[in-house]
Amino acid sequence: MYVAVKGGERAIAAAHAWLAEERRGDPAVPELSPDQIREQLRLAVNRVMAEGSLYDPDLAALALKQARGDAVEAVFLIRAFRTTLPRLAASRPLDTAAMACDRRISATFKDAPGGQVLGPTFDYTHRLIDFALAAGLPVPPAPVAPPQAGPMPHITGFLDREGLIRPEPPSDAEPPDLTRAPLALPADRALRLQALARADEGFLLALAYSTQRGYGSTHAFVGELRIGRVPVAVEIPELGLAVEIGEVELTECETVNQFAGSKSEPPQFTRGYGLALGMNERRTIAMALVDRALCARELGEDVGRGPAQDEEFVLSHCDNIQASGFLEHIKLPHYVDFQSESEGLRARRAAALAGREAAE
Amino acid sequence: MGLLARARPDELARLWAGLGAEPAFDWLRRPEAGTVMLRGRAGATGAPFNLGEMTVTRASLRLACGTVGHAWVQGRGAEHARIAALADALLQTDRAGELRAAVLGPLAQAEAARRAARAARAAATKVEFFTMVRGEG
């Protein structure tokens, strides 16, 4: 219960002024610009874009600066800003097969057409702190090679052609939108994918890991992971045709999972799907595992073995803005609630003590 | 329109400034920032889902000669949208050639160079597998 009280204005204003000073830090150290954050802390920016559910690297960089590097606070700022903008259109479904890939790897097919392209990855680094970075030395240029001309087909396409993987029925159904209508359960896959695409990365990671450890295991292989840029096309009403209005960086992961088959379907592979705004490899793999775990009910698998298979549990708790809003509100004044609780407790204690005395 | 939409706003503004006198125009729609909901497909090929939004700015205007220009550009740049809408209109006039030479050509070149640079770096990270000779006997 909230009670309107007055009297904090001066303290609040002073707290915010101090916050601004602390945000700046030691004035003897040069100030960070949003450009520097966007270019040099790109993965932090990407996380804020993915969970803020808004592709705008400049805005995400500024939000990170304002939030003093707190990713969830920055996501909160982005979500709040998003609500001030009108929705002008929806894009045509992004064609990830046409991605200009910076990175594309498969853990299932060594010799996939297009090859294994590592891209700018942390993989195979030794995870030793690099003190040379503190010295601000110039970066030597990366090696180059003649660009690949051929297409980069989706790996699961090969399994598709063989009938080894459960098909992904194409459709042009208008998808549900949880930014417009409250989450309704049971949720269809489109709604689940939207929720997972903006879910907290830590929550996704933990759930995905739980499936690997046996809580609803789906035995996933990374069929393919690709990162790169994809054009965005929108039907423009003024022009009456679809035009490209930009380009976004995406990370896509398709997992290939075991499926024992059911009464209506033979044994086959199934897939989990992860897609995220920006280079966001860990969250995308985790999303694919959780997506597949949540498909258990539709596949007629034994559910209830793992929290990651519990749609209501996952979808109701995956949003870090909802979660932190409810969590953090308990630090705000609850004086009256608490007074009522403590008075109740005093009364019950007095009654209990009086009863004991009477018994003695 | 895609080229203008994807252009870096500072790059576009610099090239635009070199074009010479701007034509007079009236706004049909002043630059308006908004979002476009980006959609993906489940499993890359299946049913569409809402992935998240991106910021866009749109604008429409009419030149004194009556030609209408529209722009939808990525990001929140009002000036970016204004230039793109003017360019869209001018492309329908006899200044199209001049615009292509001074603005669109260099934009396309710069974009191609940026893409080629990334593709070349990616190609250098392609794994060339070789099979180690298996020891026999």
Image (tube, rainbow, N blue to C red):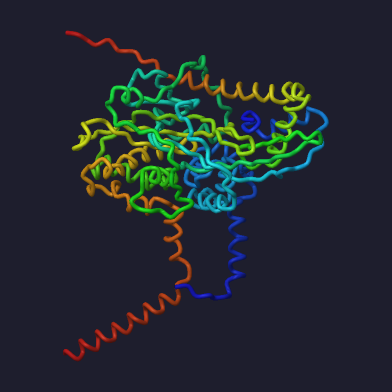
Q: Up-down: is B45 above or below A60?
A: above
Q: Up-down: is A337 above or below A71?
A: below
Q: Determine whether, in the image, residue B12 is placed left or right of residue A324.
A: right
Residue B21 in percent (x, y) is at 83, 31
Residue A100 in percent (x, y) is at 50, 25
**Residue at image point 56% right, 20% down:** B116
Q: Quadrant of residue A260?
A: top left
Of residue A34 and residue A303, the one placed in the foreground of this image is: A303
**Residue at image point 43% right, 44% down:** A194
Residue lying at the far top of the rendered structure: B137
Task: Specify whether residue A219 is in view.
Answer: yes
**Residue at image point 69% right, 42% down:** B78
Residue A242 in percent (x, y) is at 57, 32
Task: Specify whether residue A61 is in view.
Answer: no
Q: Quadrant of residue A323?
A: bottom left
Q: Up-down: is A42 above or below A349?
A: above
Q: Up-down: is B106 above or below A277?
A: above
Q: Determine whether, in the image, residue A24 is placed left or right of residue B130.
A: right
Residue A139 in percent (x, y) is at 56, 27
